[in-house]
Amino acid sequence: MRFFLTTAIDYVNSRPHLGTAYEKITADVIARYKRLAGIDTYFMMGNDEHSQNVYKRAVEQGLGNRPIEYCDRMELEFRSVWKALDISFDDFIRTTEPRHRAAVQKLAQISYDRGDIYEGVYEGWYCVSCEAFKQEKDLVDGKCPLHPTLTPEWIREKNFFFRLSKYRDALLKHFADHPTFLQPDIRRNEILRLLEAGLEDISMSRAGQSWGIPLPFAPDNVVYVWFDALINYAAAVGYGTDDEKFKTWWPANLHIIGKDITRFHTVFWPAMLMSVGEAIPEQVFGHGWVNFGGQRMSKSLGTSVDPLDVAGRFGPDPLRLYLTKEISYGGDGDFTWERYEERYNVDLANNLGNLVSRLAAMAEKYRGLRLTGGGGSGRLAQVADGAVTRYRRAMDGFALHEGVAAAFQIVDAANEFIAETAPWTLAKDPANADKVNGVLFDVAEAIRVAAVLLRPVMPASTAEILRRVGDRTPVDQLRLDRDARWRNDGEREIVKGAALWPRSDVSAGAAAKVEEKTAVSDTPTQPAAPTAAPAPAAAAPAPAAATPPAAPEGDGRLSIDEFMKIELRVVKVLEAEAVPKSKKLVKLTVDAGAEQRTIVAGIAEAYAPEQLVGRTVVIVANLKPAKLMGIESNGMVLAASLEGVGPVLVGFEKEIPPGTRVR
Ligand code: MSP
């Protein structure tokens, strides 16, 4: 099996920002996941250099007659950012390379020979920042909506046109025959609407410019930058230069791109390939935008974030985790420093990092750092097996956020398991030595499996975690099939070390109590969340936590960390049935994104089962299961409790996909 994966190639008129880095990080997570799954993967990225903006920047830097020198410098800058973020590309292409030029000229010539390229005159608007021809209807108040501070240029020039209109029906058929060609569905629908409205031929050359690849059949013209750039994907695997390689890797399995450039990748590009008789890539995924404090990232507006600044704060892995876990892949996301620090503290310092430290502290104190398999309870093994299945399903469907959440379910379960089994109490009686060993072995194993699953997201830290839980497999040889499976046997030598992620309390936004937690404790950390949370009105009662209840600090209000532990999620009701002998309870089967769950909710007096089916509701997703009238309930439905009316379900003004987190 092979997997050829690409990202968009970046314009080099400025350095990468957090938005462009988001694309590379998430694509890298997919590439690393495929490799972990044992698939022969070719992951490529690159730079898009023949843009007028790039040329302008070169002129500004005094390199107007040597723009290539400017591009050489930028290549180094881009590569150093990608290296700092641990992006594991196999190939990096530049559109000024000879292999790319050869591919562009070959494709243009074949398409021309087949009569799909003809000469004409283009007259109309051009947005230099988009590098795109715009129709009147694309402009708002005469401006490009994506670049409202710029005035589009009116151009009239002799151009060569590509017969895009000829491919409209074939494209519609391709979309119909390949329903997952463009993901997520919202993007697919946009493009289908565009295709249904009809296509016009597009200009594929520019006149009077020297910066670009000359057309082989009319060398006074250069190839239009988008027609040029799209061909990079084929050029990288040998189109026009290495037939053997091209045969091995083409067509691409997945193009990862931003939502603003889906039209180029799913209309122009497939039509260009159809014109020259080459296969069309299997899938295109159009991810959303990463904004900064709710605003579009832009250098000129001062809303651009340097990914190196973020990676410099806690290292690359926390950034990779944040972008993958906190943004539903395909949707838009947001970055703020406060939120970033919050998530770092919750997920890494308090949760995963603390778990690794506590295991080492207890393993040392009670077992001299040596653990032996064989006596575990099987409970964590079951959680881990379920999580691995959900992880694979999510990752295969590019629901990266759900994949990461599945891995963290193992971490949460291991923390709960420690609190419930209280090894520090067991250890008081030497007769419990085997039990203590069993608990700690299971915890070490849970951490090991979670680390294998998190490997694509946090490559450096998971290597360290695996070392600490005594796993000796060279990390590059880890394979999901073999290594994400629960192991009951063998000896483990646990390794102690400094806190992986010391708690941070620097930002002004962190209202939480300053509590330096570099020292490792073997007593339970304050269990936050469910028990301390105010109980939402109508739903089934929450089971009492088995861990010692948290004493809310100070005036009883929750810290942000405590609140963030409550996992509120959107679910869709698939089935609903009355619970026999109960007036209040209804049994729901819900789609929670990565899984289905059963929830018993106390809303039967206000809602008939048939009113519930198909409805989107919000649940508390990380409650321990509770048995109600003999049925196990996995979560609690949120509703307002209205005097005299009864429960009223929480809902949304827009359609929200199941699994989305609410906060
Ligand atoms: N050069 C073209 C792509 C050619 S691909 C044949 C281009 N370059 S870009 O530098 O403007 O953008 C590179 C990628 O980053 C694009 O996929 C774009 O959608 C993405 N992003 C740019 N800003 C972004 C955010 N703020 N958030 C997420 N992705 C963003 O377009």
Image (cartoon, rainbow, N blue to C red):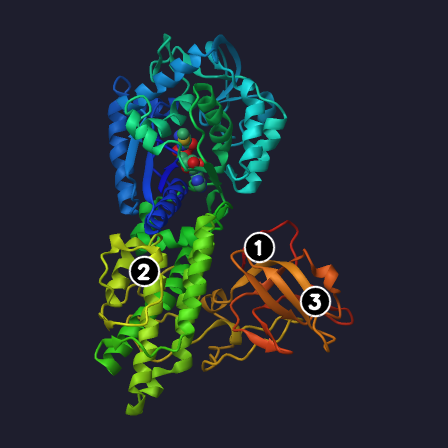
Question: Would the CB of label 3 be found within 8 Å of ligand 1?
Answer: no
Location of ligand 1 given as a quarter of the image: top left
Residue 204, position as x, y percentages in the image = 45, 17
What is the CA distance from the residue labelled 1 to the residue labelled 2? 30 Å
Which amino acid type is shown beneath numbered disc 1?
Answer: Pro
State the SS at label 2: helix
Q: Residue at x 48, y 42 (%)?
A: 289
Circle 3 is placed at which residue position?
Answer: 577
Mark 1 or mark 2: whose residue is earlier in sequence: 2
Q: Residues within 10 Å of mark 2 (few under 14, many from 20)?
A: some
Question: Looking at the picture, does residue 510 appear above or below residue 301?
Answer: below
Mark 3 or mark 1: whose residue is earlier in sequence: 3
Which amino acid type is shown beneath numbered disc 3?
Answer: Glu
Mark 3 or mark 2: whose residue is earlier in sequence: 2
Q: Residues within 10 Å of mark 1 (few under 14, many from 20)?
A: many
State the SS at label 1: loop
Q: Residue at x 70, y 67 (%)?
A: 577
State the SS at label 3: strand
Circle 2 is placed at which residue position?
Answer: 483
Q: Which of pointers 1 and 2 indicates the residue nearer the eye?
A: 2
Q: What is the residue that sits farthest to the right in this orientation?
A: 644
